[in-house]
Amino acid sequence: MTTAENVASALLRIKAVFLSPEKPFTWASGIKSPIYCDNRLILSDPEARKVVENAIAETVKREFPEAESLMGTSTAGIAHAAIAAWILDKPMGYVRGSAKDHGRNNRIEGRLDPGTKVVVIEDLISTAGSCIDVVDALREAGAEVLGVVSIFTYGMKKGLDRLEAANVKNVSLSNLDALLEVAVKENYVSPAAKDAIKKFRDNPSDESWFAAI
């Protein structure tokens, strides 16, 4: 299997990505979603963790060979950045959601000298807003952000457009299309459910995807 398929299979096995088109989840926005993603579960499964962290390290080496440091997103990307940085023998830090209100008022934790070439490690890309916020904070601090390595992406148009507008290169280990192919092959969902979930991804606010199941 490809890296995308290997990672997808691991995520499905540990239910880090959970597909439930018949009983959809409700997002904070009120949108009903047939998919739920919790990549924090990767850390609790040594086998899946090994697959994912080695894939992150290999992706950084392949796509961003000039990288000098890894920066995790808070909080989900921190552990993944730390493990991948250990594998690569590189410095690591992370970016808080907002600056601390005490001490040195840091938003960026860990050493970051101006001009350092960094790669952001993110667990999930959906609409990409939080990821771009991290990239902006690093750029403002003087870092040269080479790009982002994320574990999984839905491939939503809004997220893709935002990344392009912000001039951010994202490389995801796996994506919804690859995951759905594996999900059908391994009998997690039916072909009809696969088509319904893709329809949701392409237009999340249109609930007509229910009819495709």
Image (cartoon, grey):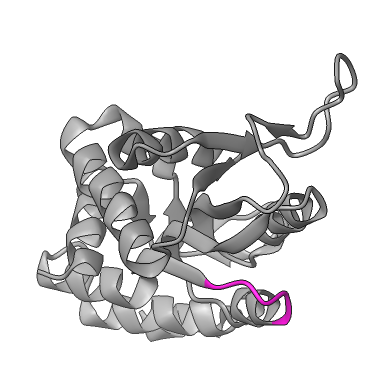
Q: Can you see residue 201?
A: yes
Hey, which quadrant is residue 159 in on the image? Answer: bottom right
**In the image, residue 141 above or below residue 59:** above
- Find residue 184 and report its horizontal and vertical position in percent: 18, 73
Q: How many marks?
A: 0
Identify whether 169 is placed above or below 124.
below
Q: Residue at x 32, y 42 (%)?
A: 88
Relative to 113, 170 lies left or right: left
Residue stretch rendered in magenta on the structure: 165-169
Which of the 4 image quadrants contains residue 22?
bottom left
Residue 113 point in image, percent of width and height:
69, 41
- Left or right position of 122 against 177: right
Instruction: Give coordinates of residue 107: x percent, y percent.
Output: 78, 34
Nearer to me, 157 or 74: 74
Q: Residue furthest right?
A: 101
Q: Can residue 205 be seen in this snapshot?
A: no
Q: Check if residue 101 falls in the magenta segment.
A: no
The residue nearer to you, when weighing 143 against 125, is 143
The x, y position of residue 19, in whole percent, is 35, 59
Magenta stretch secondary structure, dominant: loop
Q: Residue placed at 57% from the left, 55% from the top?
A: 117
Q: Is residue 202 above or below residue 90?
A: below
Closer to the camera in the image, 99 or 140: 140
Q: Report the quarter where the N terminus lies.
A: bottom left
Residue for point 47% across, 78% down: 210
Quadrant where the C terminus lies?
A: bottom left
